[in-house]
């Protein structure tokens, strides 16, 4: 009877787990690579990224490739900035990180064909920009009635949807971490005395093994704390060709190449407080997780000025899926100090059969969703410009595949837990004088995860990082200033980025989310020359 509660709590976790036991990545790893930050030149950021129909900025190469067709002179530029990343949980814990950033560098080469020919210009461009920044620090703590040791025990108790405990002999054997049927987190929990074999005792009979029990005394409370340090980014290298037809219709195409580097170092702590008020010790679970890889996609777009006497423009673009090839690694350890007789403080880590530390490694493919972009823009002579843009991408259509191209069953999780993402951009630019401009912008991105989404750790997974966050909608508020000389120009932008997230240390139907508010500030500077 003691296992009925566990079956109920982990019922959803176990459904459909069969057939996906070799896959270690999660939908949260996939979500990390979909979408992009509001980033690029200071002019682009200052206008909230709403330049798809206005064009004339190198950053439009990544949203509407036809925007490069507006250029009539060569251009070279570089962008860099300073960022303050801050997060605060509902309990008042907060942390900030200040760092520099290199955001954008590129050039445009224009080739004039003629003044009276249908084809007026053929332009070529290259642009590097940091598509996403993963730099973030996180810290939180609280007192709850749930312990991750219950999660560890159930990883050892259930396999393929059935109560089928791993044998003690298998866990204690040399090379247990190399056994493809045993979850690494479960072995770490056993080696740290956080989960222990349970037996049913019957008078006159031999004790019967009945699975694993967590280190959690009746009535215990658990004091939990979590800290994490994330670093890295997603980098884009865009190659563009665009065409100016009749000075009214512009076409463009961009090939994008991507490189990925991401690392997260985290520490999860639990201290056990008994119902009698005594301290029953605790443990630290340390995790290192890092990924690398690359991808490629293709974008096409247009800008059309339908009325010859008007500066009103309509723009549109289609982005193919990005095809990523990714390798992820992970390593973990547990340091423990428990109130168990004759048990001294110690530690356990992932080792091979020779007792040497080892890392987990997994390779997979990610195919992101298609993306569709519509925009409008209008210029009021040389006095002002206004742009509005809408973008849609159905994240639930993304696919995870193994190295042989076979679709992983986590793709079904993507379909059920992720949703379409809508992005709205608006921006305006005013000319205070022929050389000086002032800009305002707004950018809104809806949440990609459903509120009930959660992270699965498979019953034989080599992954040991159980935490996950469901992010809410993102809002960006921007303003900027610009100077345009005959050759040299400089732009500056300020960006305020804010979003909320619901953090879970591990998957449990009774675990409350820790609500976190993220407020980030960025100052960006672009300098360049047109000639």
Image: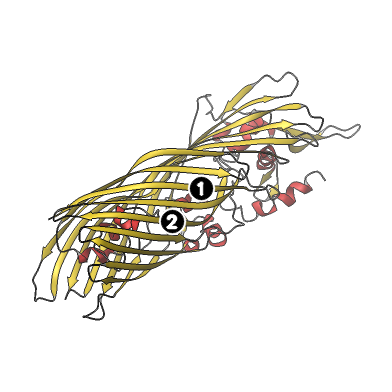
Q: Position of residue 432 (x, y in %)?
A: 26, 61
- 193 on left or right of 411: right
Q: Give residue 120's quadrant in the image.
A: bottom left
Classed neighbour count for the residue bearing mark 1: other residues with Cα under 10 Å, few (<14), some (14–19), many (≥20): many
Q: How is the image coloured?
A: secondary structure
Which residue is depicted at the point 53% across and 60% down? Answer: 418
> Which residue is at 24% across, 78% downward?
310
Tell me whether circle 1 and circle 2 mark residues in contact (CB < 8 Å).
Answer: no
Give the tally of numbered discs. Answer: 2
Residue 407 showing in the rendered view: no
Quadrant that contains the C terminus: bottom left
**Extreme right residue here?**
203
Residue ID at (73%, 49%): 7
Residue 387: give its label: none
292 displayed left or right of 454:
left
Circle 2 SS class: strand
Q: Earlier in the sequence, mark 1 or mark 2?
A: 2
Residue 518, disc: 1
Label 2 Cα crowd, 10 Å radius (few <14 / some 14-19 / many 20+): many
Percent position of residue 137, x then y:
49, 39
* Rendered location of residue 398, percent (x, y): 46, 60
Is there any visible trace of residue 462 in the rendered image?
yes
Front residue of 397/179: it is: 397
* Image coordinates for residue 157, horizontal then vertical, percent: 70, 42
Q: Nearer the viewer, residue 29 or 361?
A: 29
Observer-nearest of 36 and 74: 74
Vertical arrangement, residue 76 with respect to residue 346, above or below: below
Q: Secondary structure at mark 1?
A: strand
Mark 1 and mark 2: Cα distance apart in space: 12 Å
Q: Give the label on residue 476, or none.
A: 2
């Amino acid at each position: 009877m003691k296992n009925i509660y566990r079956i109920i709590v982990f019922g959803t976790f176990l459904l459909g787990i069969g057939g996906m036991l070799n896959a270690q990545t999660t939908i949260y790893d996939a979500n990390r690579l979909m979408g992009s930050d509001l980033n690029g030149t200071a002019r682009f950021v200052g206008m909230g990224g709403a330049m798809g129909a206005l064009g004339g900025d190198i950053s439009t190469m990544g949203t509407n490739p036809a925007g490069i067709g507006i250029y009539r002179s060569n251009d070279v530029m570089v962008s860099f900035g300073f960022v303050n990343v801050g997060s605060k949980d509902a309990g008042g814990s907060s942390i900030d990180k200040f760092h520099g950033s290199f955001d954008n560098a590129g050039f445009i080469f224009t080739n004039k064909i003629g003044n009276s020919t249908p084809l007026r210009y053929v332009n070529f461009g290259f642009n590097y920009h940091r598509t996403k920044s993963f730099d973030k620090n996180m810290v939180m703590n609280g007192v709850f009635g749930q312990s991750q040791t219950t999660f560890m025990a159930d990883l050892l108790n259930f396999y393929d949807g059935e109560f089928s405990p791993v044998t003690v002999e298998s866990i204690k054997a040399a090379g247990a971490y190399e056994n493809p049927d045993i979850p690494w987190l479960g072995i770490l929990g056993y080696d740290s005395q956080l989960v222990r074999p349970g037996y049913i005792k019957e008078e006159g009979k031999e004790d019967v093994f009945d699975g694993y029990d967590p280190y959690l005394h009746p009535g215990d409370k658990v004091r939990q704390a979590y800290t994490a340090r994330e670093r890295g980014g997603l980098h884009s290298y865009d190659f563009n060709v665009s065409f100016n037809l009749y000075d009214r219709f512009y076409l463009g195409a961009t090939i994008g190449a991507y490189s990925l580097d991401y690392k997260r170092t985290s520490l999860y702590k639990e201290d056990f407080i008994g119902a009698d008020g005594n301290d029953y010790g605790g443990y630290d679970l340390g995790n290192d997780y890092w990924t690398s890889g690359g991808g490629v996609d293709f974008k096409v777009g247009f800008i059309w000025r339908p009325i010859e006497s008007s500066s009103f423009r309509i723009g549109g673009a289609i982005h193919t899926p990005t095809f990523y090839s990714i390798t992820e690694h992970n390593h973990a350890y547990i340091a423990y100090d428990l109130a168990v007789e004759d048990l001294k403080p110690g530690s356990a880590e992932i080792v091979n059969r020779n007792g040497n530390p080892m890392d987990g490694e997994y390779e997979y493919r990610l195919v992101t969703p298609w993306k569709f972009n519509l925009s409008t823009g209008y210029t009021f002579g040389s006095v002002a410009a206004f742009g509005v843009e809408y973008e849609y991408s159905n994240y639930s259509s993304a696919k995870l595949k193994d190295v042989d191209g076979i679709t992983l069953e986590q793709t079904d999780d993507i379909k059920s837990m992720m949703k379409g993402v809508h992005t709205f951009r608006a921006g305006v630019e005013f000319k205070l004088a022929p050389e000086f401009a002032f800009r305002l912008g707004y950018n809104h991105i809806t949440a990609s995860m459903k509120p009930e989404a959660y992270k699965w750790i498979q019953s034989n997974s080599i992954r040991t990082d159980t935490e996950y966050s469901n992010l809410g909608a993102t809002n960006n508020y921007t303003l900027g200033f610009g100077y345009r000389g005959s050759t040299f120009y400089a732009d500056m932008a300020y960006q305020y980025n804010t979003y909320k997230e619901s953090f879970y240390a591990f998957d449990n139907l009774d675990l409350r989310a820790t609500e976190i508010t993220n407020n980030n500030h960025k100052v960006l500077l672009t300098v360049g020359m047109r000639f």
